[in-house]
Amino acid sequence: MFDVLIRGGTIVDGTNRKRYVGDIGIVADRIEAIGTDIDQRAKQTIDASGLIVCPGFIDVHSHDDLAILHQPELPFKLLQGVTTTIVGNCGHSVAPMPQDSSVRAGLRQYMEPVLGHWAGAREPFGYPEITDFYDDIVRVDKSLNVGALVGHGPLRVRVMGFSDAPATVGEIEQMQRLLADAMEAGALGLSLGLMYVPGCYSAAQELKALAETVRAYDGIVTAHIRGEGDFLLPSIREMLEIARATGVSMHISHLKVVGRKNWGTIDEAIAMIREARNVGLDVACDAYPYAAGSTTLLSLLPPWVLQGGIQSALSRLADPELRHKAHEALEAQGSDWENVAVITGWDRVVLVSSPSRKEFEGLSVADVAGKLSCDEIEAYFRVIEASAGTGTIVIHHMDNRDVEQVLAYEHALVGSDGLPSEEGHPHPRLYGTFPRFISKWVRESQVLTLEEAVRKATSAPADRFKLGDRGRIQRGAVADITIFDYHRFEDEATYENPKQFACGLRYVMVSGKLVVRDGAIGPDHPGRFIRRLNHGGGRSGGCKSEVGRRGGGRSGDSVSCH
Ligand SMILES: [Zn+2]
């Protein structure tokens, strides 16, 4: 007797095998049988005829670190068919936090625009140790699975504050120890945010040493690289060099080309990754299916303005001489840092969350300049001041052809990079990434087959991030399953109206429990924290453990995967 029988669906199994019609029998959290016309009894039967049945999608690039604690059903992910979200990307994570409360407050200001502001939340940046944060993820009743990377930002700030100096040997060793603690606690790897403070201050020696630690645990390094426009190719080269020197799995986050004059360099970028793979380096990337990005308001400032934290940046802007210097730096074409605003154009930088000046939300910086009767850079400074440095932007800086090239590349996975928050006006990728990937690039433009697109969103990320028996419809695999109507599956979220759920999603199952039924979220919370299982010595064999939550008979247990 099965717990659930999914009958007559068109199975796209996640491995790129051609689709076929079949039944899937599930017992507890596992796929027990796959066949045609299974006539065994089941406690619950789902008629999936005419629907696509595939493994649940894995969002390899999320910033759901706090969202999962405060909105543990994560409706904006679950209702895309996502069953696993990987948090802690772009060098941002909420642990391990610095002891000093003012340094911690500074770090919080940097990370809140990315990780979201959650009203009424308990101190969300109060985790001195990574284990405290992971315990909270385990404890919360969540609908979907969570895996976590540890951010380079907190490691560096905990050891060095907001210093822009290169790390000393002693400081590097301290960071390595914190990183090893995180890996022991079950982190899947390390994320770099080299475009952001404090990652932008780090040099090769520091990054290589940290990569070596990750390598020792057989983890992954994900990288928001230093530059994605004028500096795209050297920034990729920098990561390939780390992979070459250390042998670490290197993953380029949200691979893209920023700024019109750079459009087309994506071919060269992909060629570099191909060549690296050809000589045996473990390098791949992810992307989101949109031609606009989203990031923090402050990230367009020259790095020297940001040195020391947001308060320091605000005091620099308050000093007329330094404000003038920053203005000049932002005007410069051939700057020695990635001047995203100048290569994109201020008319393409849109304020999406501007907490204290709501009237600016939805306007470009050029629009705001018109309203304030000043130039665009001055308008940008005034928005920063009005919002005390918080706030997020959407930047329309990519070319659709480049986006398509990346999505079509066989070693590119899908990651939403959604910035969750209760307030404001997020980039639509938060709600629409996976349905859009399928509807636009499979159904409409046929850049990918459905089988290949599903592989890139399921078994490929499960293998790359070593998530155990997930990402495939096969006997014995964990029953994380998404069922949708192929002809109707489509993102509804737009730049103007981003908080819209997709249509065409019918069922989502996590660990054998239906969490979405007929498009609505149900009462079960079977999500697990997926962590590395370490067998001592920092040299674990890459085996994973899943720590279950209360209820469902999986309380606090560990299940090794292979
Ligand atoms: Zn990023």
Image (tube, rainbow, N blue to C red):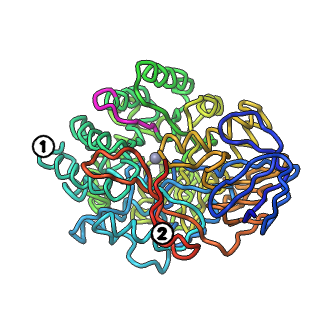
Q: What residue is pinned by disc 2?
A: 117
Where residue 159 appears, as percent x and y from the top left, is 19, 56
Q: Decide which of 421, 25 is in the foreground and name it.
A: 25
Query: What is the x, y in percent for residue 158?
Result: 23, 59
Which element type, helix, strand or loop, lies under badge 2? loop
Residue type at mark 1: give it: Val
Q: Is residue 308 magenta?
A: no
Above or below: residue 498 compared with residue 254: below
Is the residue at mark 1 in contact range of ligand 1, meaning its CB lies under 8 Å from it? no
Query: Does 247 appear in magenta?
Result: yes
State which tag comes first along the sequence, 2 or 1. Answer: 2
Mark 1: secondary structure: helix
Looking at the image, residue 552 sits to the left or right of residue 274; the answer is: right
In this rendering, does residue 348 appear at all?
no
Write down the residue under mark 1: 169
272 sits to left or right of 95: right
Q: Considering depth in this image, is 491 or 354 the residue closer to the camera?
A: 491
Q: Does any portion of residue 333 appear in the rendered image?
A: yes
Residue found 51% across the figure and 49% down from its top: 468
> What is the total number of numbered labels drawn onto the structure image?
2
Q: Residues within 10 Å of mark 2 (few under 14, many from 20)?
A: some
Alpha-carbon distance for marks 2 and 1? 36 Å
Residue at position x 28%, y 55% in the image = 320
Give the residue displayed 28% in from the left and 68% down from the top: 128
Placement of the N terminus among the 4 image quadrants: bottom right
- Which quadrant of the view contains residue 216? top left
Depth order, front residue of 435/422 = 435
Q: Residues within 10 Å of mark 1 (few under 14, many from 20)?
A: few
Residue type of the residue flagged with mark 2: His
Point out the stretch of residues depicted in magenta: 244-252
